[in-house]
């Protein structure tokens, strides 16, 4: 039995679908803070529980051999207003999970981390062994999770797979730039506020590529396996705005808030080196631009349902 945390959320629900399709028994724990019950795979067990509560975690881990820890608060922008919520849902929750895993003798963990652990990297594409100096509270808590996982691996003979994602986009996503643009344009199709100067340029990966990449990464068998997962190209925020407008059939005036960052902690340029995971035979099917167009169509379709 696999315990998948955050399985009612965007990436977690797609991973649960994949694991069920592969014939795995899956149990999901999610507090539905951003996840939705309708996204939960019907063939998975579901527990509405909170990772900040050791009792919920203990119950969820019964009979489990492996944990896929996807739950987190992924809102980088929240860091400015509410560092405590990010800390508790990311770092504290991961500590509680690792402690309960250790006590239950569960030794394998798959963890979804982020490009933001690198902060403002000067080497682009950024490889896995680049220094990690996050500039957002979110990135700091995820790096803290990585450090805890690494230390638990070495102290308690656990094994881990850590994936540092670029921007993952697609069906069921409830945050991020495409989602924001669609919401704003639905309210006012004549003007689109773009955070920053629109030149922020980052790598985007479509959800099906991301799920495949994770499965490929499991072929690695070190005690601690760390992989970047993203695309080989990137796309600017301004170009994303143009694509969203094209797909919605609107021609708003763009209003830039200015500055090279969209918000405190925003990393203006991000492209990860994916050479390490490519060596295992994986590569993304869709470019950043294709992924953005497909995800825009997905989210427009979802927003009219
Ligand atoms: P999401 O918000 O859709 O999913 C997170 C899920 O975790 C939600 O279902 C939420 O209800 C649940 N959750 C949050 N706190 C919880 C808690 N304390 N107890 C139980 N459940 C809790 O976000 P997502 O985009 O699917 O992100 C999934 C993972 O991928 C996160 O770990 C995130 O840090 C990482 N990640 C995402 C991206 C991206 O572009 N989407 C990029 C890098 C890393």
Image (spheres, rainbow, N blue to C red):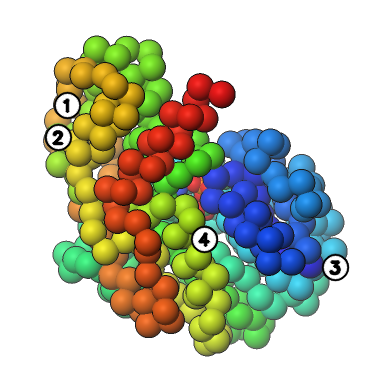
Q: Say what secondary structure mark 3 lies in.
A: loop
Q: CA distance from mark 2 to mark 1?
A: 6 Å
Q: Is residue 52 left or right of residue 44?
A: left
Q: Which circle's residue, 1 or 4, is located before the other in the chain?
A: 4
The reply to whether dot 2 and dot 1 touch (C-beta < 8 Å) is: yes
**Crowd class of label 4 (few under 14; some 14 to 19; many from 20; radius 10 Å):** many
Q: Residues within 10 Å of mark 2 (few under 14, many from 20)?
A: some
- Provide the secondary structure element on which disc 4 rests: helix
Quadrant occupied by the N terminus: bottom right
Q: Which residue is tagged 4? A: 211
Local crowd size for mark 3, using a 10 Å CA cut-off: few (<14), some (14–19), many (≥20): few
If you read the primary sequence from the N terminus, does the residue marked by circle 4 or circle 2 appear first?
Answer: 2
Q: Earlier in the sequence, mark 2 or mark 1?
A: 2
Residue shown at the point (49%, 36%) measured from the top left: 174
Where residue 256 is drawn, which disc sits there?
A: 1
What label sits on residue 103 in the rendered view?
A: none
237, above or below 44, in the image: above
Where residue 232 sits: x, y (%)? 26, 64
Q: Which image quadrant for residue 178?
A: top left
Q: Position of residue 11 (x, y in %)?
A: 54, 51
Q: What residue is shown with label 3?
A: 63
Q: CA distance from mark 1 to mark 3?
A: 52 Å
Residue that numbered label 2 is attached to? 197
At a point 65% along the width and 85% down the height, the residue shown is 157
């Amino acid at each position: 039995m696999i315990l998948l945390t955050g399985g009612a959320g965007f990436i977690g629900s797609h991973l649960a679908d994949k694991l069920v399709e592969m014939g795995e028994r899956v149990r999901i724990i999610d507090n539905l803070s951003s996840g939705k019950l309708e996204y939960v795979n019907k063939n998975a067990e579901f527990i509405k529980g909170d990772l900040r509560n050791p009792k919920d975690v203990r119950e969820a881990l019964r009979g489990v051999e492996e944990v896929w820890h996807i739950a987190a608060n992924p809102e980088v922008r929240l860091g400015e207003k509410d560092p405590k919520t990010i800390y508790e849902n990311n770092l504290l929750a991961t500590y509680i999970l690792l402690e309960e895993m250790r006590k239950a003798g569960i030794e394998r963990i798959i963890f979804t981390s982020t490009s933001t652990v690198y902060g403002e990297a000067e080497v682009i594409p950024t490889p896995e062994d680049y220094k990690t100096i996050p500039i957002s509270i979110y990135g700091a808590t995820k790096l803290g999770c990585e450090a805890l996982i690494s230390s638990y691996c070495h102290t308690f003979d656990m094994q881990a797979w850590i994936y540092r994602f670029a921007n993952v986009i697609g069906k069921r996503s409830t945050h991020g730039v495409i989602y924001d643009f669609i919401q704003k344009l639905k309210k006012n199709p004549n003007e689109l506020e773009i955070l920053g100067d629109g030149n922020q340029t980052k790598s985007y990966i479509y959800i099906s590529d991301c799920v495949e990449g994770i499965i490929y990464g499991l072929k690695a068998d070190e005690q601690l396996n760390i992989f970047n997962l993203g695309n080989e190209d990137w796309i600017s925020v301004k170009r994303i705005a143009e694509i969203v407008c094209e797909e919605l059939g609107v021609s708003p005036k763009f209003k830039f808030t200015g500055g090279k960052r969209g918000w405190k902690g925003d990393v203006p340029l991000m492209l990860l080196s994916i050479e390490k995971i490519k060596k295992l035979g994986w590569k993304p099917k869709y470019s950043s631009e294709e992924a953005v167009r497909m995800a825009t169509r997905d989210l427009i379709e979802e927003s009219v349902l």
